[in-house]
Structures are given as C-alpha cells and as structure tokens.
Image (tube, helix red, strand yellow):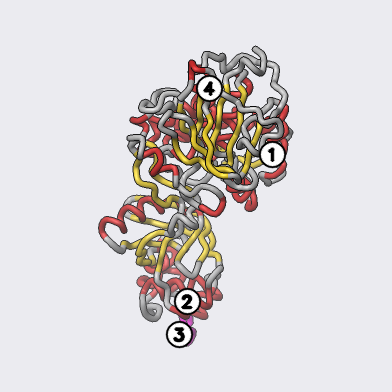
Amino acid sequence: MSDAEAPFCAVIGAGPAGLFAADALARAGARVVIYEHKASPARKFLMAGRGGLNITHSEGLERFISRYGAAAARIAPFIRAWTPQALRDFCAELGETTFVGSSGRVFPASFKASPLLRAWLRRLTRLGVTIVTRHDFAGFAESGALRLIGPDGEFTRKVDALVLALGGASWPRLGSDGAWAARLGAQGVRITPLAAANSGALIEWSAIFRDDFEGQPIKTALLRHGASTARGDVVVTRAGLEGGPVYALSSQLRDVTQKHGPTTLSIDLRPDTSLECLTRKLSRRPQKQSHANFLRKAGFSKVEIGLLREGRGEGLPRDAETLAGLIKNAPLTVTGVGGLERAISTAGGVSFDELDDNLMLKKLPGVFVAGEMLDYDAPTGGYLLQAAFATGLAAGRGAARYLGLSPDKPVAPFEPDQTGMSPRQSPNGRDPEASNKYSL
C-alpha cells in the first residue's frame, strides 16, 4: 500500500495512550497524525517521571486486574492483551531496561521518563507519524468532519478513523482539562462525571501543627477507613495528608465525604507493634518524665507526637494503655479530598456501555477512545500507565481493523510528512483528505 492509498487517521492527545494508539496504527499501515494542544508531547508522563517513573507492577495478573475495582471486568481484556511483561518488553525495545523494586513496582533503570519518551518519539518518526502541537480538539462539524483549532484558527479535517486520547481532567495545566466531556456529551455519549482520584485528604490542622510540620514525612503508617486499609509513607501538607496510602483510600474518602460530609480516617503509627507490647513499653515511663519526652526517646518523631495531639484534640493521655490505643488508632477528621488541579488521576469518563469491544463509540462509528478518558478508577503503582498503554493499543488496533488493515502484520513505515497541520502551516499546502469509505 502506498502512502497516497493509505487511510488517514488522527489521534487526539500525545500522552502514552495516544502515542501507543498512533504506534499501532502506523505499524498497521495507516497515515497517522497526532494532534496535541500543548507545545510538546506527553507532559504529564514527563511529570510522573520526576519522582522515578513507576511504569507498571510485577504482581500476578489476576491480582493486577482486580486493582481496577468496579471496572476490572471491562479493563481485563485489554490488560490480558497487553500485559505488564509486554510493557516491560516494549521499554527494552526502546533501550530502557526495567527492574522490579522491593514493593513489586516496576521502574526503568534510569528512573526517568525522558529517555523512554525520546526513544519512543524517534520510533514514531521512523514509522511516519507526525505530531502537530498547539492544536485543540473542538468536536465535530455537521458533516461529521473533525474540528480543530490551530494557531491560525479553526479548521476541519476529514479522517478515516479517529482515536481520542485526551486524558482525564487532573493536572489541567499539563494538558488534560476534561473539556472533551461536553463535546462528546453533545453527541449523545454518556459520560460519568469526572472527579479527582489519587488525591490528598483534606484535614483542618491546627495553625501550630500546620506551620510546624508542613512537608514533614510520617514513615510506615497504616491508614484505616472503614474496612479498608493502606500502608506506607505519608506527608503532612498545609491542607492535610498526601502519599501512597492516602491516594489508595482517596476515592472512598471522596465518595463518603460527598454523600455524608466529614469522615474519620484512622492512622496507626506503629503497625508492626501490637497494642499489648506498646502498652508495656509505655508503662515504663519514669514518673517525672513527660510523655512527650519519653515518646521522643522511644523513637517517635516530633511530627508523630504532634499528630497524636491533633487526633486527640488535647494533651497526650497519661495512662499508658490509652496512649498506646491512640498511637494505634489516632482519629483524623477528613473533610474531603484535593481537587482535580492536584489529583494524580481522574475517575469517571466515557461509559464502557457506549463502546464496543474495540473501544469504538457506538454512536460515532470510526471514533475510538483510549486512556484516562475511559470510566475507570485505579490506584497508583503502575496501574494507571499500564491501562493507558493497554487501551491505547486496543484503540489503535481497533481503528486499524475498522479500516480493513491488519494490526498485527509488520509493514514498512512511511516517510514522515506534514500533512496534518492546519492549512496555513502545511509547507506544501497538501490536505490529507480521507477516503469516502471511512469519512466521519
């Protein structure tokens, strides 16, 4: 198939889901242009890599899939088709070997996203994929053509297939602002309202505690909310608590506080020490020594002692058993969770009932959806990126099948071109018109 004969496909969004959908389409033989409304691709992916890029997780596949909660059955086929090991193999192909950390999480050897992204972009260039930045998705024209807004204004493009990978609504300054929800809603697509996920717990600290301990870590704590628990390190912020265990419980905290108002989050500062053992240890306090000094000498940090006072709302109890009970179960009042502007991910999105098995919108044939636009809620730990890759691949392969291409057949890549730019940007004025067979 020559370049001129190949179907023209647009991908909206240059995050991991969009890049992987474009990769699959280009390998199947399509001409592909990625439209990104920021000035450079994959900004949130790069941000995720600043703290050590957690690309996926090494736990068993069934346990892995269960992490997607209510959406597990919907996500399962895509994860099975693109497993965590497949993602690790893909990273190795790009020259980034991965390793399993002590927690089971998987990281690239460099701990960074930038080397992986650079190698990936070079691969896409060799496949003939064009990335056009500063172009916004504006919905669809009455004719069904794709509407875009570029630096020179609005224009339309006929496409043979379209993959939407615009992300959720968290960290909007990095590109995913959720504006697509209204545009798809106008087409009759049912969308679960977008909400913050993997976000911090909001707690109204006293001014003294907030000013003294903002930014201080609390190591190896166990958090409880109802029957749910999560363990790990947390950090005190001006607004409350952040960290992996908080994020793991944040969706539950969000739902409860939205429906019923403030709720209690309990924190166990010594999860590996029993209440009985802790009580015996605290009963050895010298008569003239204050509990605060005794706790410091027993290994409790200043922030931990301050948190115990916050939980109790008054001075530390004198009785060893009561104090031990507080250490094992300090109650904190959570008023809500952080907003989308700081949330790691987004819950809600396009309902799976609106999609077929290839992630194509039933109401918009030829339009596929991938990544965080989909209605699932997953914890941190590699699950978010794994789902972005897996659904991006599924949408790309689904679009290829829709176009009559073989998504698994190796093909010679096309030379990169500039055919996806807005008319005044295209150096040769060429318009990548779609074939009539697949026009939207």
**Left or right placement of residue 176 versus residue 418 in this view:** left
Q: Residues within 10 Å of mark 1 (few under 14, many from 20)?
A: many
Label 1 or label 4, whichever lies nearer to me, is 4
**Label 3, on which residue?**
287
Disc 1 versus disc 4: distance between alpha carbons?
22 Å
Secondary element at tag 1:
helix
**Label 4, on which residue?**
397
Q: Percent x, y for residue 168?
A: 46, 45
Q: Residue at x 43, y 59 (%)?
A: 338
- Asked whether 409 or 153 is in front, the reply is 153
Disc 2 versus disc 3: distance between alpha carbons?
27 Å
Which amino acid, mark 2? Answer: Phe
Count of numbered circles on the image: 4
In this view, the residue farthest toward the bottom is 288
- Read off the magenta span: 285-291
Q: Percent x, y for residue 208?
A: 47, 80
- Asked whether 119 or 178 is in front, the reply is 178
Which amino acid, mark 4? Answer: Arg
The mark nearer the N terminus, 2 or 4, is: 2
**Label 2, on which residue?**
209
The mark nearer the N terminus, 2 or 3, is: 2
- The answer to if 7 sits in the magenta stretch is no
Label 4 or label 3, whichever lies nearer to me, is 4
Q: Residue at x 41, y 41 (%)?
A: 183
